[in-house]
Amino acid sequence: MNNNQLHLLSGIMVVKGISHVVVSPGSRNAPAIVVFNRQSGLSLKSISDERSAGFYALGMAQQLKEPVALLCTSGSAALNYAPAIAEAYYQKVPLLIITADRPEAWIDQGDGQTIRQRNIFSGYVRKSFNLPQQIKDDESTWLFKRMVCEAIDRTTLPAPGPVHINLPLSEPLYDIQWPEKPLVTKIPSVAPTETQVNAVTMSNLSHLWNTSPSKIILAGQMRADDERNQLLTKLTEDASVILLSESTSNLRVHQAISCIDRTIEGIGPEEMTHYRPSLLLTIGGAIVSKKIKTLLRKMQPTHHWHVNADTDDFHIDTFQSLTLSIPVSEKTFLKQLCERTKPLESDFKQLWQKRNHSQMERHNNFVDAAPFSDLKVYEALFREIPRQGQLHLGNSTPVRYAQLFEEASAFSNWSNRGTSGIDGCISTAAGAADICQEPTTIITGDIGFLYDSNALWNKHLSSRLRIVVINNGGGNIFRVIPGPDQYEELEAYIETAHNLNTEGLAKNFGINYYPAHSQEQLEATLQSFFKPQENNKPALLEVFTENKYSAQVLNDYFKNLSS
């Protein structure tokens, strides 16, 4: 590849609105790093660990609502992006992944740091592009420009997501020439459009909605949106409608039930018919609650409408009851529906709210009397985390505990629930803290933290970042979910039991460290932990709990709810 291609690539990126590039050091991608760094309009962040870099870019893109570029060297470096790319794909976050490569002729010829990179992420990107190795004439220049323009546009249209550009670079790598004039002139753009349900179909749907005596709106993972809140508030004024949401739904709707797991705990086969919806409307992304998935699969609502604007991925049947896919944005559909709704007399919402209130009282009484344990730690955290800040929740225990507390829904919530893996939660929060100007707190388990501890190997960490590690000596989720705790292999092979702590890691990377071994020490530490640090550094709070005891407390909690 000659130098003009690198200058053309960087120029198109700027014109197309990309301003941030997360790069990882390497030789094959070094010419691109040099050109990108000197391209006006591009801001580079250097993060050595590609896996961490991928999630860092994911966090940045979440906040920016625009694509962030990644750039790595050839070989296995590219494979380290895979977890973040898969998460971005399922969470619909725009990323432009640029992998430097050896020339095509050297693939599978025993050359160093050379693997098959063409279509390497094919299952988890919107599209892959293998750029021409050389620009020889006007036609090859036209082809190069067209491929790059399409690649960048595909990160946002028809739905956001990651796109891969493979960049073959020939030697000599460091003989970089600079063009005398800008290479980017006229390039194509895409007009924004918005589709909606046609009038006849909407008339039929609104009739069915207005005549259904029991309706549940179930909201999955979404970013906060005031207009959506207003539309859902109007719909839930209807006595036949109940809205179920999660902390990751980021909804602010007064009559919503935001703690699904505790509300539905104890609903038996005899009661199920009373709470069964005749119509289920699902919006947003992934649902955290396994309990609501199980319950709705048993309930089998007569009608299930799923709204999903992604035309490549709209036939999702999570609850095995799908009757209609509606491939438009949820706000577009909610607007159309609100214009045609008529309130219906029903006791359905009242029934759900009465149960929610009863379970809330049980929850409060139990938590107030609970001893020091994971449950009590989360109660204290959700009370003390700055309300104006962002909350990132690690998988898998933290995001589940958050669904038990209304207080968790007071924040702007983020979690890697696209693929629900534990990797990358610290790196994602670090990337988000880089962009947003608010305090950013990440709560993670000890295994999730240790798995992503290279996130601290990063000179760009914001002083607004607060990391909370719940250290209960292993993957305590396996003592909570039914099954694993009955086998002797639990400690040695399943929950990853350990006697490690994070103090040495924090100090090695210059992170302020706070330990807490009791409720009293935790309460005394939280306020100073969340205050601005004197040395303008991020801070890490490690809370030590006992795994078997915490698991027993949580099991007793659910027994209390269902008694």
Image (cartoon, helix red, strand yellow):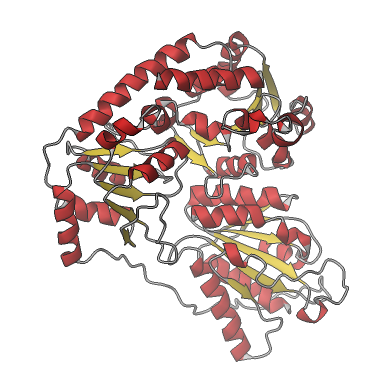
Tell me: residue 187, above or below residue 319: below
In percent of width and height, residue 107 lies at: 80, 76
In percent of width and height, residue 180 lies at: 66, 78
Left or right: 507 in relation to 526: right
Q: Residue at x 53, y 52 (%)?
A: 61
Left or right: 345 in relation to 507: left
Is residue 438 among the parts visible in the rendering?
yes
**In the rendered view of the protein, which quadrant contains the C terminus?**
top left
Please tell me in which quadrant of the rendered image residue 388 appears.
top left
**In front: 448, or 33?**
448
**In front: 254, or 100?**
254
**In the rendered view of the protein, which quadrant contains the N terminus?**
bottom right
**In front: 339, or 367?**
367
Is residue 93 among the parts visible in the rendering?
no
Q: Residue at x 69, y 33 (%)?
A: 495
In percent of width and height, residue 146 lies at: 54, 80
Q: Residue at x 53, y 36 (%)?
A: 392
Q: Residue at x 64, y 65 (%)?
A: 121
In percent of width and height, residue 25 lies at: 77, 56
Left or right: 477 in relation to 327: right
**In front: 362, or 393?**
362
